[in-house]
Image: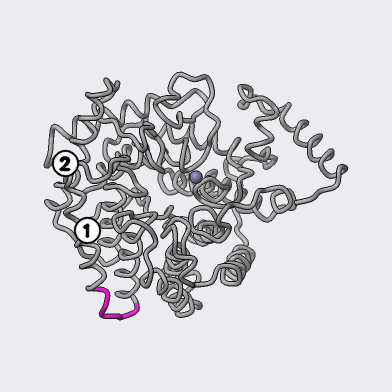
């Protein structure tokens, strides 16, 4: 985007002035601060201050985004690649998610129709690997199962059968050489899909024992890798030989899923101990500033720059939340509060509005804190992040993501965040529900 020299100069000066007043950011150079995020000029919430949300304005933002998404990303075969993450399946998920929101119920039938339209091409051509939940066809099958059920289409059972037919592949310890345990392409993603479907359908799609078998493989895989690499905690994982810690390809999402499978910690006591120690180890890696290293290879470095859902505090916070709900240990709440303060300071990302590495994904941190603590401060912060996404500064200076309309990188995820702002008690980052106990 071309900008005049004057505009750039005034932005630089304004940003520099604001930076002088922010102590928390002192370990980053001015240049780094300006490259990664906008300075947060909003006032934080004052205790007792009443909160107001202009629902019409938020709804208008949602409608604007939907207009652009449907204009720019057609439900066609050429847009299937990348599945839930950046393909049409993700846009279908957004429409399904909107259809469940009672505040937007007047558009319910339109949302469901759009959800079906955007899913259709993904059932005609493959999005990626069959077994990949976020990047491939497994995600499409799970959404089709739920969406068909919701719309009374009998093919729902067929779709579920297809999803379940993949099951045995995850039991093979060597099923993916690049690292088969994480969220995008691995076992944790498949289990996340199973839990999500069970909750939406209000009936388990696997028996607990079937899910425990996959958990056992995940735990054995983590133990073997940890022993081989002399890791400082009982379970360690890699993705393409990098030991990621965050939500995208890393340990934190794997742990969140192991903590979420109903009854697993009672069923396998040895695994439960390993999981607990590994969660504690992960919590211990939080820095003074509240962030986490991107991967084990960066542990001990003085500064961790990425404040993204995919890498850093905004994704790891879900594991801290789940750990709190399982162990009821105040330390996990403290970790979340610290992470949230960091996100408030450094979370207005220049990378765009998405949920993977964008402003809405970071705004979800506050909605999670709001649901856990009930403190209005967090709702205020979420509102300010939504507000910033329509500010002149953001519209002018934020970068356009590679896939601008997608669920994880683009505005389809932003729409989910805005819809959750209308109903914060039920807010939920896609497939990151920490509250359900999945007992039916
Ligand atoms: Zn990302």
Q: Which residue is mark 1?
A: 166
* Viewer-nearest residue: 229 or 338: 229
Q: Quadrant of residue 242?
A: top left
Element assignment for label 1: loop
Position in image of residue 303 (x %, y %): 54, 23
Position in image of residue 423 (x %, y %): 48, 60
Q: Magenta span covers which residues?
A: 151-157
Seen at 37% across and 64% down, the residue is: 126
Up-down relation of residue 227 to residue 322 (above or below) = above
In the displayed structure, does residue 213 sit left or right of residue 348?
left
**Residue 216 numbered tag:** 2
Circles 1, 2 touching at the beta carbon (< 8 Å): no
Position in image of residue 401 (x %, y %): 59, 52
Seen at 49% across and 67% down, the residue is: 78
Query: CA–CA distance between discs 1 and 2?
Result: 17 Å
**Residue 298 numbered tag:** none
Element assignment for label 2: helix
Name the quadrant of the C terminus.
bottom left
Task: Give the number of callouts.
Answer: 2
Q: Quadrant of residue 13?
A: top right
Crowd band around label 2 with a 10 angstrom C-alpha radius: few (<14), some (14–19), many (20+): some
Seen at 43% across and 43% down, the residue is: 373
Up-down relation of residue 40 to residue 185 (above or below) = above
Queried whether the magenta region covers residue 112, the answer comes back as no
């Amino acid at each position: 985007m071309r900008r005049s020299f004057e505009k750039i100069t005034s932005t630089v000066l304004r940003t520099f002035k604001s930076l002088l007043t922010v102590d928390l950011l002192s370990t980053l150079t001015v240049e780094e601060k300006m490259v990664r995020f906008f300075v947060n000029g909003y006032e934080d919430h004052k205790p007792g201050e009443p909160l107001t949300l202009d629902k019409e304005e938020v709804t208008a933002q949602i409608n604007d985004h939907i207009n652009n998404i449907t204009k720019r990303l057609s439900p066609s075969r050429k847009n299937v690649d990348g599945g839930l993450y950046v393909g049409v399946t993700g846009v279908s998920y957004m429409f399904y998610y909107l259809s469940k929101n009672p505040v937007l119920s007047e558009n319910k039938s339109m949302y469901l129709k759009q959800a079906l339209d955007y899913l259709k091409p993904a059932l005609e051509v493959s999005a990626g690997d069959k077994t990949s939940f976020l990047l491939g066809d497994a995600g499409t099958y799970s959404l089709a199962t739920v969406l068909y059920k919701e719309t009374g289409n009998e093919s729902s059972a067929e779709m579920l059968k297809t999803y379940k037919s993949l099951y045995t592949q995850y039991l093979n310890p060597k099923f993916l050489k690049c690292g088969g345990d994480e969220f995008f392409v691995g076992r944790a993603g498949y289990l996340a899909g199973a839990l999500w479907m069970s909750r939406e359908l209000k009936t388990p799609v696997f028996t607990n024992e079937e899910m425990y078998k996959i958990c056992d493989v995940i735990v054995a895989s983590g133990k073997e890798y940890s022993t081989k690499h002399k890791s400082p905690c009982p379970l360690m994982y890699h993705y393409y030989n990098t030991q990621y810690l965050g939500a995208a390809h890393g340990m934190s999402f794997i742990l969140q899923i192991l903590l979420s499978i109903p009854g697993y910690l009672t069923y396998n006591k040895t695994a439960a101990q390993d999981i607990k120690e590994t969660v504690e180890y992960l919590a211990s890696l939080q820095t003074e500033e509240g962030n986490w290293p991107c991967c084990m290879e960066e542990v001990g470095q003085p500064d961790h720059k990425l404040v993204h859902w995919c890498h850093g505090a905004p994704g790891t916070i879900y594991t801290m939340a789940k750990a709190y709900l399982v162990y009821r240990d105040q330390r996990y709440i403290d970790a979340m509060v610290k992470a949230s303060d960091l996100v408030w300071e450094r979370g207005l990302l220049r990378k765009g509005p998405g949920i993977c590495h964008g402003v809405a994904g970071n705004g979800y941190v506050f909605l999670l804190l709001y649901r856990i603590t009930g403190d209005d401060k967090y709702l205020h912060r979420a509102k300010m992040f939504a507000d910033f996404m329509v500010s002149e500064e953001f519209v002018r200076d934020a970068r356009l993501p590679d896939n601008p309309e997608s669920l994880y990188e683009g505005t389809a995820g932003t729409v989910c965040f805005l819809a959750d702002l209308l109903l914060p008690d039920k807010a939920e980052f896609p497939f990151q529900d920490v509250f359900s106990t999945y007992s039916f």
